[in-house]
């Protein structure tokens, strides 16, 4: 999903309304006693109520937090649309170090803010938050997904996020090498946290050779304890510079920069991280270098599919069957890209935008 924020009036730095162009609503949430400072962004409710996780992260500034939540919420709209869900796009960020600031009181205070939106936004897990946190939020709020299995929830959404990425990677392998398998291929996974370590398991079981990296040595140690054959390198720059068939960014956004594209040997990029393209135009650079890019919001929608299934009464088998269709969606996007002579990122955007436009005419703004 592409797009940049316009400059503010008369060349001034962009304000909230300038940056949130296309968004329906941005809500600042502050609870001084608990230290809560959160931003909820609702990009679109054309297809239904907005659903997206709450990211708890020590942003360097409020401006960085706002930029992130706007990008992430916009991506959720496209993700839900391309996955065929009757949901819109939203996201929330809580500013601070979750290891020191996150408490039951803070989470419950946040839940009251989500409740005040009356169902226009459903929250779930993201970086820095877990199913147990959603249980705390749900004590004050009816609009929570990704809860623990003990409370009837889907549990850890990273399970089907990784499964969906693997399905997208199979489709990319078929488009590149003629067979939907990673057997005998070398895959580099950058980030082996909640999603990445599940992805490694799928790849190893499929017969791939896997090399990983992560800023957290414990994450690497856990993967290598489960899969001793997996290799590790010092950092993402080193990983990109090694001989790879597939590069899988599974950490934070912006992984695909000009410098990375210039040096990578991989023929496929397919990973779980959101907003992988560092700026507009990277998708064309990848295409020009013969690298097949599987748009991030297309292949990482398995987690959204998993938590969205809670709204019907969670069934893991049903959610997994839906996530498996990411393989078909990926093939459809690649086919459209080839037919129209555009990068897959553009083709995916066109399919998602068409669905939001056509269905949105029937619904308008979701009121809850």
Image: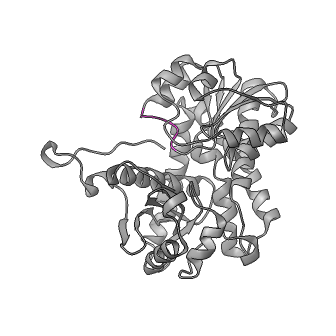
Q: Residue furthest left?
A: 10
- Name the magenta segment's main secondary structure: loop
Q: Quadrant of residue 203?
A: top right
Residue 364 visible here: yes
Q: Nearer the viewer, residue 294 or 265?
A: 265
86 left or right, relative to 165: left
Is residue 82 positioned above or below 224 on the image?
Answer: below
Q: Please state the horizontal and vertical placement of residue 119, each as a whole percent of the image.
A: 50, 77
Q: Nearer the viewer, residue 141 or 212?
A: 212
* In magenta segment, residue 279: yes
* In magenta segment, residue 365: no
At 50% from the left edge and 76% from the top edge, which residue is drawn?
A: 105
Q: Please state the horizontal and vertical placement of residue 356, each as a whole percent of the image.
A: 50, 58
Is residue 367 positioned above or below 1 on the image?
Answer: below
Q: Which residues are magenta?
A: 275-280
At 42% from the left edge and 34% from the top edge, which residue is drawn?
A: 279
235 left or right, relative to 177: left
Is residue 90 positioned above or below 299 on the image?
Answer: below
Total count of labels: 0
Q: Please state the horizontal and vertical placement of residue 357, each as a whole percent of the image.
A: 47, 58
Residue 167 visible here: no
Is residue 327 positioned above or below 334 on the image?
Answer: below
Q: Please state the horizontal and vertical placement of residue 234, each as a whole percent of the image.
A: 63, 27
At 57% from the left edge and 35% from the top edge, which residue is drawn?
A: 344
Figure colour scheme? one colour
Q: Nearer the viewer, residue 233 or 24?
A: 233
């Amino acid at each position: 999903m592409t797009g940049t924020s316009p400059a503010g009036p008369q060349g001034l730095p962009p304000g909230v309304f300038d940056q949130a162009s296309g968004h329906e609503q941005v809500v600042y949430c502050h609870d001084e006693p608990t230290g809560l400072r959160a931003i909820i962004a609702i990009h679109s409710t054309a297809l239904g109520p907005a659903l997206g996780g709450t990211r708890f992260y020590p942003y360097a500034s409020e401006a960085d937090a706002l930029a992130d939540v706007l990008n992430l919420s916009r991506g959720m709209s496209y993700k839900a649309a391309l996955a065929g869900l009757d949901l819109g796009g939203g996201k929330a960020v809580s500013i601070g170090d979750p290891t020191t600031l996150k408490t039951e009181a803070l989470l419950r205070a946040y839940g009251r803010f989500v409740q005040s939106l009356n169902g226009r936004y459903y929250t779930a897990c993201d970086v820095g938050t877990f199913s147990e946190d959603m249980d705390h939020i749900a004590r004050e709020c009816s609009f929570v997904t990704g809860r623990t299995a003990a409370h009837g929830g889907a549990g850890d959404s990273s399970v089907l996020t990784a499964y969906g990425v693997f399905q997208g990677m199979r489709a990319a392998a078929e488009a590149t090498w003629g067979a939907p398998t990673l057997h005998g291929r070398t895959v580099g996974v950058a980030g082996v946290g909640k999603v990445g370590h599940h992805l490694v398991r799928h790849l190893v079981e499929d017969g791939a050779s896997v090399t990983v990296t992560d800023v957290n040595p414990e994450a690497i140690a856990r993967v290598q304890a489960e899969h001793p054959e997996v290799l590790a390198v010092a950092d993402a720059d080193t990983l990109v510079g090694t001989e790879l068939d597939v590069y899988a960014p599974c950490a934070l956004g912006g992984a695909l920069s000009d410098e990375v594209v210039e040096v990578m040997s991989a023929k496929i990029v397919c990973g779980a991280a959101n907003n992988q393209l560092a700026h507009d135009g990277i998708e064309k650079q990848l295409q020009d270098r013969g690298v097949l890019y599987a748009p991030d919001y297309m292949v990482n929608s398995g987690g959204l599919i998993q938590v969205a299934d809670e709204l019907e009464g969670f069934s893991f088998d049903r959610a997994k069957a839906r996530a498996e269709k990411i393989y078909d969606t990926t093939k459809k996007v690649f086919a459209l890209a080839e037919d129209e002579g555009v990068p897959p990122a553009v083709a995916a955007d066109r399919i998602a935008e068409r669905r939001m436009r056509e269905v949105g005419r029937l619904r308008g703004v979701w009121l809850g």
